[in-house]
Amino acid sequence: MIEIFFSYAHEDEKLMDEVRRQLIVFEREKRIVKWHDRMIPPGSDWKNQIDVRLHNAKIILLFMSPHFIESKYCYEIEGKEALKRHDAGEAVVIPVVLRPCAWDASPFGNLQALPKDAKPISTWQNVDSASLDVARRVMSKVDELNESN
């Protein structure tokens, strides 16, 4: 089972949730396990929980938006660690463009982004279609990783 880490700014939680929901069927089939910070139990060391999950994930989704770029924690801590693991071949980092932003000028700009043509989800006529496009393409990467193991 492939673990997927969701890195997002809390201001974008509703759009992130649209993608998360489209992946539920694959989680129920036990093909993936998803993780995001809202799953941290009360009273837990939140930073440690994030660090462990970020270190263990095979796929890291970076939900790009002006809020993500503005967030020091998302951009500089989670994003930097994600790229380090990506460059070492330990994980695959996939930018998911939620809202129009200059993500392509960021250190993540050389990575192939989702959804199709890196068109921000918020600009699609149908958010469900955009989110499903992301989910299907993420699952293609999951299948690719499973085949190589």
Image (spheres, rainbow, N blue to C red):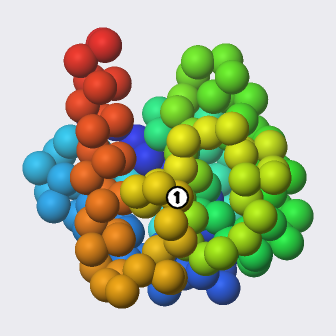
Taking depth in this image into account, of 131 and 33 the one nearest to the observer is: 131
The image quadrant that residue 28 belongs to is: bottom left
Q: Is residue 42 left or right of residue 27?
A: right
Task: Give the percent coordinates (x, y) of residue 50.
Answer: 65, 53
Task: Give the percent coordinates (x, y) of residue 41.
Answer: 53, 70
Figure quadrant of the C terminus? top left
Secondary structure at badge 1 equals helix
Q: Determine whether 7 is above or below 10 in the image.
A: above
The image quadrant that residue 70 belongs to is: bottom right
Q: Determine whether 5 is above or below 87 in the image.
A: below
Q: Residue at x 35, y 71 (%)?
A: 130
Q: Which residue is mark 1?
A: 118
Taking depth in this image into account, of 63 and 123 the one nearest to the observer is: 123
Q: Is residue 117 left or right of residue 70?
A: left
Q: Determine whether 5 is above or below 12 in the image.
A: above
Q: Residue at x 31, y 13 (%)?
A: 148
Q: Residue at x 75, y 77 (%)?
A: 67
Task: Give the percent coordinates (x, y) of residue 45.
Answer: 71, 60
